[in-house]
Image (tube, rainbow, N blue to C red):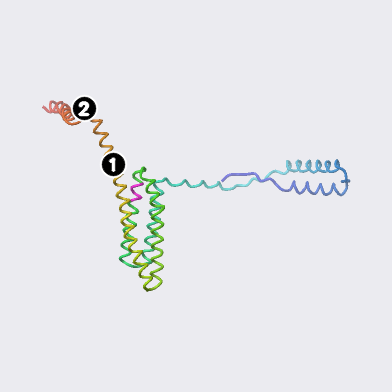
Amino acid sequence: MRQIKRRSALPVYIAAGVYALYALVMPLYKLWHFLAAALVTAGVWMLFDRLIKPEIISVPEPEAAPEPPSPAQAVLDEAARARGEMERLAASIGEGAVGAKIAALADLSDAIARDGAQDSADLPQIQRFQQYFLPATIRLLEAYDRLAAGGEGETVSASRERIVRMLDTETAAFQKQLDALYQNDALDLDADIRVMEALLAREGLSGDGLGELLRRQEEPRSERAQ
């Protein structure tokens, strides 16, 4: 809690009353008449503003604005939100085969988000993926849900079959995106290994040089053991 001062409005009312009284008893037809009335009114207001102490009131401290999530947490949150929507729609659709496809998409979406949480270099690619594919997938599922609730018919069946095929296409796209992220990780690992190999070679610790160093380290231990 913090305390603030709230000034009373009473000095304003008193000053307004004095001005009205002054206007009743004093002439007000020249400029200096109005100036005198203004000075008297201002003086009365200042006097009573000093005499009447402000009220001290306690107010709660303003709540600090929550910090935005980190980019890594944001992609995890978005994947969790998308999974919740997919699971809701799968339950509403109530078809086992379609539900399995939806579950596969949700699992791939989670895996893609987890990669972003572990490797920040992949975050821009994952954010673009989530901004396009996840909303598009949910819109497709919503359309399928509406069609499933609308009954049977040649047009409805054809539309539903087309959406099912699109879910298969999206599953392949999700898997391709995940494979691309794993490929990035593999390239990073390969680069790290090459740097380590070059460092070991420069220090004479690769190949025979490393073996010789290990033998020299083992010799004092053998002598102490004897």
Q: Quadrant of residue 103?
A: bottom left
Q: Residue placed at 25% from the left, 34% from the top?
A: 196
Relative horizontal placement of residue 136, taking residue 210 as reference (left or right): right
Q: Kindly identify which numbered label has been placed on residue 154.
A: none
Relative horizontal placement of residue 167, taking residue 200 as reference (left or right): right
Q: Earlier in the sequence, mark 2 or mark 1?
A: 1
Q: Is residue 164 above or below residue 211?
A: below
In the rendering, at what x and y percent does residue 176 appear? Answer: 31, 52
Magenta span main SS: helix
| Amino acid carrying mark 2 in the image | Gly
Q: Residues within 10 Å of mark 1 (few under 14, many from 20)?
A: few
Q: Residues within 10 Å of mark 2 (few under 14, many from 20)?
A: some
In the rendering, at what x and y percent does residue 128 appear? Answer: 40, 49
Range of the magenta residues? 112-116
Which of the pair 11/115 is nearer the observer? 115
Q: Quadrant of residue 213?
A: top left
In the picture of the structure, the residue carrying the numbered disc 2 is 204
Q: Is residue 138 above or below residue 63?
A: below
